[in-house]
Amino acid sequence: MSELIAEIAVNAPLKQFFSYRVPEPLAEKVAVGMRVRVPFGRRTSVGFILSLGSGSAEGLKDIKDLLDEQPLLSAELLRLLRWAADYYCHPLGKVIRNALPAGLGSDKATTRILVEPVYRCLNAESRPRGSKQKELLDYITQQGQAGLAQVREKFAAPHAALKRLVELGCLEQAEQERQRDPFLLEELPQDKCLTLNSDQEKAVFEVSTAVDNARFKAFLLHGVTGSGKTEVYLRAVESCLQHQRQALVLVPEIALTPQLVARFRARFEAAGYKLAVLHSGLSDGERYDGWRLIKRGEVQIVIGARSAIFAPLDQLGLIVVDEEHETSYKQGEGFRYNARDLALVRGQQQDCPVLLGSATPSFATFYRSEHAAVQRLALDQRVHAGAMPKVELIDLRETPPEGVLANPLIEELQATLERREQALLLLNRRGFAPFLLCTDCGTSFHCPNCEITLTFHQRERLLRCHYCDYAEPPKEHCPKCQGLNIEPEGAGTERLEVEVAELFPGVRIARMDRDTTSRKGAHQKLVDQMVHRQIDILIGTQMIAKGHDFPGVNTVGVLGTDSLLNMPDFRAAERCFSLLTQVAGRAGRSSGGGKVFIQTYYPEHYALTCAAKQDYHEFYRQELPFRKELGYPPCGHLVNLVFVGNNLPQVKAEAEGMAQNLYRLAQDVEVLGPSPCPLARLRGKSRYQLLLKAIDRAALRRLVLVVEGLKNKLKNGVGLYTDVDPVDMF
Ligand code: ADP
Ligand code: ZN
């Protein structure tokens, strides 16, 4: 007998899908994309319906429940998720879960409950009995309606009483989406009515034409800092809205781009469009609300960080990826996807153009633009004042600094302060000092869980691991020689702050890094203070380089450049160039003629000389031959296999075992390693890696499938994760 069968991805770390019978009562309601509860092993599990068909149900278990009335995942979104699961070698059930706001991936209630009194039915038999029920009902009647959290604040353990009141018909449950908008309190800037310059005009024309045609096309908006890229995004989104389609705007980390969000809101909310903002600072409830709103089609524009690539937009007309070179588009753990790359896939699947913007495009994107897969749109001029900042490299071999700052930079800061202008100082390392050293015997202090020195944080008086958050107070004596001469070595932002305060007493100094911005709203406050010129010198990590428009900044100093260049990663030069160019771009945005100083021991390095000239093309021209010769991206493709376990020899043995198999089976793929990861111990686990490299993506893919097949042969609890297109080799 032929019956209805559902193919289901179970929320478990398993690659395969499972078939279940759809029992009669559910058959009418069931649809692809719904969540279900199914028996799985000895327990029940949540799963997602991938497809429905008919056939013999012999030996199949029944679906227990449907958890949704409407499909949670549209066919389009499911297609994207399946593609991603396959490409990144991650179980589909987990991928789906990752794409949904917390709460929806599980079987918890999907509606936020709100109770309202029902006036009509207060007849005798349905009158509440207990005094608690009465009090509750009185309270809610008085309020008109109340949310669960609100009730819980007033009454201890209100659940049973509420439930009874609902059963009696005195209260009604309603689903209500609370509009909690973290940006609501902010003042919106006045929307400026701008006349586009000719480069902007051309870019907008190209993208809008693609939007009109509702076809996939990829664009690189390559515009120097301050060239008006955001205005191009705004216009492109406008043309998308005119077609009654939705726009998705991805930004690296939204908490760090309040100015961009504000400009979108100023332009579109006034015109009556609805925006949803998704980012990591939201509570689960807020994220959930935003997701439901989008799902119901009530939102025209979604702005969000990485995971917003999975926003449930069915009428997508345009995807914008701002600062597309940013590494934060890649998720570093679990499901290791790259949202920028998925944007291109989604654009293809949903027939809409994708606009990637940057002043310093990733090599991957620029390479594609040279090979016609991506159309490059250039904005080569700054909008205001024209002139790009003047960049000077300070050779530390000639002017060795006493502290962190070299003399020419100190003098420039002095002059800046006298002119009543603002300055930015970038040092990409937080804390006071990267390590403490016993100057008698040379002992330094390491994290017990990770193979890395502990960073000294002076204000907290703690040694901290920047990978696993382990912390301990610094010791008075050296544990090895009992010596008392323990000194902080090197400098982080905290130390720089102290030094600057000593050099310039009375000057308003602030610091922006992970330590000072962990509280909600703290980052925003610093940005506001900068804009309103309540800070003279802002010190910070790479955070200060991101997209801000600080009109009063004419001076930028960059410190610790050499440690950027010397990261153990083939992309170190690219990252360094990109960061320097971005931070330099913060100078002189309104007046022109900004000045940038870069301190280094190696001013001849092409990443620095090119950054000094703000010359992306020259940097690309010099760097590409290295990549080509070694077959590294963008000229080749990489997959990193990372073996993780408790016991180092076992991890090594498993990695070697896999390597032996792969050496034998690899065709047109280089198998490099195994070798200990650059961070060979992390969070208490030992790690080995095996790097697969190929010019031909298909060949690499074939070998990756072989690895997937061998995964379950690993012994001794050694785990293996597959990082496709890794961006970070730690
Ligand atoms: P980018 O994102 O390329 O760094 P922005 O989009 O932030 O640059 O633009 C820099 C500044 O120039 C903003 O204050 C913006 O309002 C302004 N601007 C952009 N385009 C124009 C234009 N066509 N005319 C006048 N001002 C403009
Ligand atoms: Zn650690």
Image (cartoon, rainbow, N blue to C red):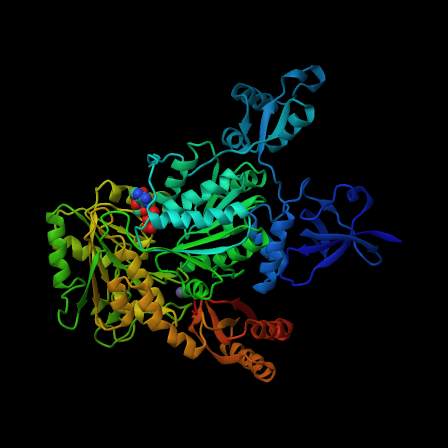
Q: Position of residue 39 (x, y in %)?
A: 73, 53
Q: Residue at x 21, y 42 (%)?
A: 533
Residue 325 in which image quadrant:
bottom left
Residue 103 in which image quadrant:
top right
Q: Position of residue 695 (x, y in %)?
A: 51, 75
Q: Position of residue 95 (x, y in %)?
A: 58, 56
Q: Position of residue 226 (x, y in %)?
A: 30, 50
- Examine the rendered structure and indicate whether residue 187 appears above or below residue 66: above
Could you tell whether 610 is left or right of 173 in the image?
left
Give the total of numbered labels: 0
Instruction: Please tell me which residue lies in front, 252 or 694.
Output: 694
- Asked if residue 236 shows in the view, the reply is yes
- Asked if residue 249 shows in the view, the reply is no
Could you tell whether 698 is left or right of 505 in the image?
right
Q: Ligand 2 is located in which of the four quadrants? A: bottom left
Q: Residue at x 41, y 74 (%)?
A: 627
Instruction: Please tell me which residue lies in front, 682 or 413.
Output: 413
Instruction: Please tell me which residue lies in front, 44 or 26.
Output: 26
Residue 161 in which image quadrant:
top right
Could you tell whether 493 is left or right of 58 in the image?
left
- Examine the rendered structure and indicate whether residue 625 appears above or below residue 289: below
Q: Residue at x 59, y 22 (%)?
A: 137
